[in-house]
Image (cartoon, helix red, strand yellow):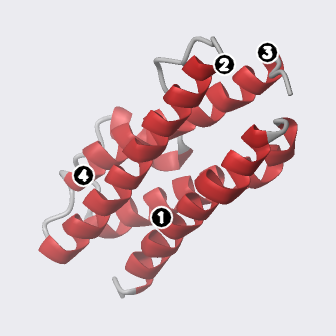
Amino acid sequence: MAHTDKDVDTLNSFLRGEISAVETYRQAIGHVSDDVRRRTLEECRLDHERRVEALRERILQMDGKPAEGSGVWGAFAKMVQGGADVLGEGPAIAALEEGEDVGLREYERDANKVHGDLRRFVRMELLPAQKSTHKKLSHLKHTLH
């Protein structure tokens, strides 16, 4: 099945979210001193980086132009960009989890906007990976107390 510009737009929307997630994790890691928590955040950042690469590859295969910038990803991205050095680990991790919530909702909401093999790619690769990072962050948040 031929892919449409709408398919490229939807994948680029996912891509912007993933790029933003990578940037946000990079910034958040600087606020976390606990080694175990830092490792978990690094794992999540790497998961998002893999999705960035997978999305870029798919968009290029469709002769599309991958987005280069990021969208705004949850409250944490805004706080960090506003100079959030005053944040502690707890608020940083809670805000990252909120970003994971947003990402999960976007994948679930927009998975059916793409067609054919792209829908399978979103449902079988991106969505399960997003659920996995969401679960890690949720677990991390609940172990803070």
> Label 3 belongs to which residue?
5
Residue identified by numbered label 1: 133
Task: Give residue 4's position: percent from left, percent from top.
Answer: 83, 18
Q: CA distance from mark 3 to mark 4?
A: 43 Å
Q: Which residue is mark 4?
A: 86
Say what secondary structure mark 3 lies in: helix
Mark closest to the chain's N terminus, 1 or 3:
3
Please name which of the two marks, 1 or 4, marks the residue nearer to the observer: 1
| x and y, in percent, of residue 15 in the image | 56, 32
- Residue 128, relative to residue 73: is it above or below? below
Q: Amino acid at mark 1?
A: Thr
Circle 4: residue type? Val
User: Nearest the camera: 66 or 20?
Assistant: 66
Cα distance between the residues tagged 1 and 4: 25 Å
Dot 2 falls on a residue whose secondary structure is loop
Front tag of 2 and 1: 2
Q: What is the CA distance from the residue labelled 2 to the residue labelled 3?
A: 9 Å
Write down the residue under mark 2.
62
For badge 2, the amino acid type reads: Met
Q: Secondary structure at mark 4?
A: loop
Q: Earlier in the sequence, mark 2 or mark 4?
A: 2
User: Taking 8 as reference, is 14 left or right?
Assistant: left
Tell me whether circle 2 and circle 1 mark residues in contact (CB < 8 Å).
Answer: no
Which quadrant of the view contains residue 64? top right
Q: Earlier in the sequence, mark 3 or mark 4?
A: 3
- Which residue type carries mark 3? Asp
Q: Is residue 72 visible to us here?
A: no
Front one among 112 and 83: 112
Residues at marks 2 and 3 touching, judged by CB atoms closer than 8 Å: no
- Marks 1 and 3 sit apart, C-alpha to C-alpha, by 29 Å
Tell me which numbered mark, 1 or 4, is placed earlier along the sequence: 4
